[in-house]
Amino acid sequence: MENVKLSERVPVGAFYRTNIEAVEDVRSRYFIALSIPAFLLIMIGIGTWESLAFHARSATSFHQYEHYLGALNKIQEGQSSATQDLQEFANQTAKSRTNSSGQYISHFEKKMAYNQPLNTALSNLLHGNNGNIPLIRGQLKAAAHHYQEIEKQYFSYAQWFLSGGGALIFLSLIYVWFGILQPIGKQSRERALALARAGEFNEDVINTSRVIIMVIDANGNVVLVNHYFQTLLQWPRTQIVGHPLLNRLFLPQDHASILALLDVGNPEQIQELPILNSAGNQLIMAWTVTPVRDVTGEELLRVAMGVDVTERAAAEHAQQIALLKAQSLSDRLQDEAQQAAELHTAFLGPEQISLPGLSGIAASITSSEVGGDYLDCYTTKETSVLVLGDVSGHGLAAGSIVAVAKTVINQLRADGIGRPDQVLRQLNNAILNTAQGLRLMTMICAAVDFRHGILYIANAGQQFPYLQKPDGQWEMLEIGGLPLGQELDLDISTSEFDMPLGSRLILISDGWVEENAPDGTPFGYERLEQALEDFSTLGDTQLRDALIARLIAFCERDTFDDDLSIIVVHHNERYPAVSEWRPEQPLEIIRISQDYYANKTISPRLSRQHIVLFAEHEWQNLLPRMSQDGIRRILIPGNPFLQAMGWDNLLNAHKEIDNELSLYLHIDTPLQLPITTSTDKVGVISSLASWLAETDVRDDWIDVCTLVADELLENALYAAPRDARGQAIYSKSVDRILNEDEHISLHMGRRNNILAVQMRDNWGTLTPSTLLQRLGAHIQGHGLIADQGGGGLYLLWRFSDYMQIRVFPGRETRATLFFDLDHPPHEDHYPAFQFLYHSDICEVNHDYL
């Protein structure tokens, strides 16, 4: 689009407006010149006419009174017939007194009309008494003399108007000639010369400029085109001038746009529209329209000007094509980068860490599409292993090294290798063989012996870890080493530390201390350690979030120059060693009372799968501590409902079984409702409600059971499916179809007053620490845990009379809720529950897998 206004480049409209203004100016000056003498002539004529009219009226009155005097003389001589004229005078006087006709009466006439002696003498005379004739004669002579003087006066007025007015008209004509007409003539000649020169200039501009110019009249006909119009479009003037604008020059689909542009008449508006040349080819023109109006504002003409932008439009089109190709390439690269980022994310370990003896969180914030940080965790027979590494650089190259590290870790997991020095040594050789020394990787590996509470750490150039003891004090573990990928068979040593129950370990990448404030000051170890001290009492998730918030506040931005990774874990329970257990010697149930637990510390060496807490009163207040200690089996002795279910069966719930409904309800074929898509949920719940109604279950219990079934199925469909990092795979707002190897089903059964609803899925992702943390959070009044929820689990527990969850990690979850139909539904109690977690570490009666 043209940046310069066409109306300024070619001022055709201004030229037309100047001509019109010149004509209007001359016209207005001539009007003024003629109006002055005309006005004087009118005024003189009016004055003369009025003077002569009053002169004639006065002459008439003079002659009338002379006539009355003659009549009076005749009466005095004895001619009685003359009284008729005096009677007329008497009537006129009386009429003047009443003025019934509303005519103007002069002061003199009024004086005579109200002259009582005159009226009396006149009345006596008319009745034959001639004694007052002298009085009457004197008044008539005075009246005649009065009107004779007025007659002379008005005649002199008329003479003055004629002589003086003639002089004024003569003077005004002199003024008009010398003061107006001669200057007008001079200015008109000068302006005509200027307009002629401007016309020649504008004609030169119009005909030499490389701009199409068309002048259109009010009817839409073309009245003028310039030479460039003919040169560019090759149209004969006879086919365009005098014809409608839209006849030949524009495509039918553009007529509305052309008319709209003409109607707006805004020189600021520029619109690109094609015009046709004589051969029918299109040229892209940038059009603008300038209206030409007279001094009253009425539009006379419209000047349309267009600049040929065909080549530029073609260039823009080519550029657009190039941009589309570039965008397509960018989208493809972006898609590949996104896939690489998703692959890198899949390489990372779970965000929620739940290992034997350890629980916590992990997080990684990448500074580019594909990060270079790597973190993971796994378990061997004796240790829970944590790794955190950082590849030099970012992007796809760094991501490829992360893929190598993930492959090695998977092999180490399969081989059961967990010693930190062995882990780092194998990683070093694999990275060196892959990158040939072009890429290095710093890494720290920590392994916790969950039997005895011993921490083993090996470091290859990564940041020092921090260990928080149960008393809350932090200690930096200064363990150094060279980065991986420099030399074959790198010498790596392992350091050993005591890790009491309740200790917390933090592993971080170098980005935490190297990020800079706007002034270039690094965050550094001192600020990191101060933050750890400030947030030492927070939970793992809250500690991670608080550290990130502190770093963001220091850097004054929420994006970082380097990747940031962190692992925060608690050592909260201990497990027996595999070598300390034999299948032929089953572990005994460990029964502890509520009072004992409230006042004693449970040994970390005791398997939580075999500890049963016998609850009594207000036991729910112990849930936060149970969450820390990992106590996940709670039974209430003497509870009639639990006794009816089978007390011994509840105590031995840690033993692996295939069918809880068969064990507790003594039925072999419970109602089973499988799920294949998320849309099946409505039908399954409807079938459940029908089955409950057929078995004479009360409506209030039907409402509770359908609510419970809905929550169980929702968890199985959306909460249970998780990736390697522990992130939910599916969003609740999306309908989903189950995979071929995915199984979800709802089971129901009833025996007398005992009703059971069970949900099964083959994900096995729910952990004891997750359940305990969420129940404890509600008891403490914290409600939902940030980014985790948990309200559904809490409500399921409170609605039931007993809840049992059995999980085979990565294989199956069975959540079963039992209800006592002899009582109405209520949620004002805290029922017993047991979480049986059959991990790959033998806790009950099955070997390490």
Image (tube, rainbow, N blue to C red):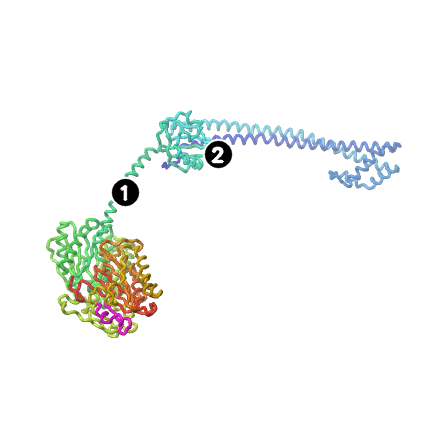
Q: With 692 as the anchor, is 373 left or right in this view?
A: left
Q: Are marks 2 and 1 in contact (CB under 8 Å)?
A: no
Closer-to-camera residue (186/611): 611
Say if 259 sits above or below 637 in the image.
above
Q: With 112 as the anchor, is 670 left or right in this view?
A: left
**Image quarter (top left, top right, bottom left or bottom right) of the C terminus:** bottom left
**Segment colored magenta:** 629-653
Kind of residue indicated by mark 1: Gln
Q: Report if residue 647 lies within the magenta region.
A: yes
Residue where numbered disc 1 is placed: 327
Kindly tell me whether residue 524 is visible in this rendering.
no
Kind of residue indicated by mark 2: Glu
Mark 2 Cα-neighbour bin, 10 Å: few <14, some 14–19, many ≥20: few
Closer-to-camera residue (78/404): 404
The picture places residue 289, in percent across and down from the top left corner, at: 42, 34
Disc 2 to disc 1, how far (Cα)?
49 Å
Residue where numbered disc 2 is placed: 299
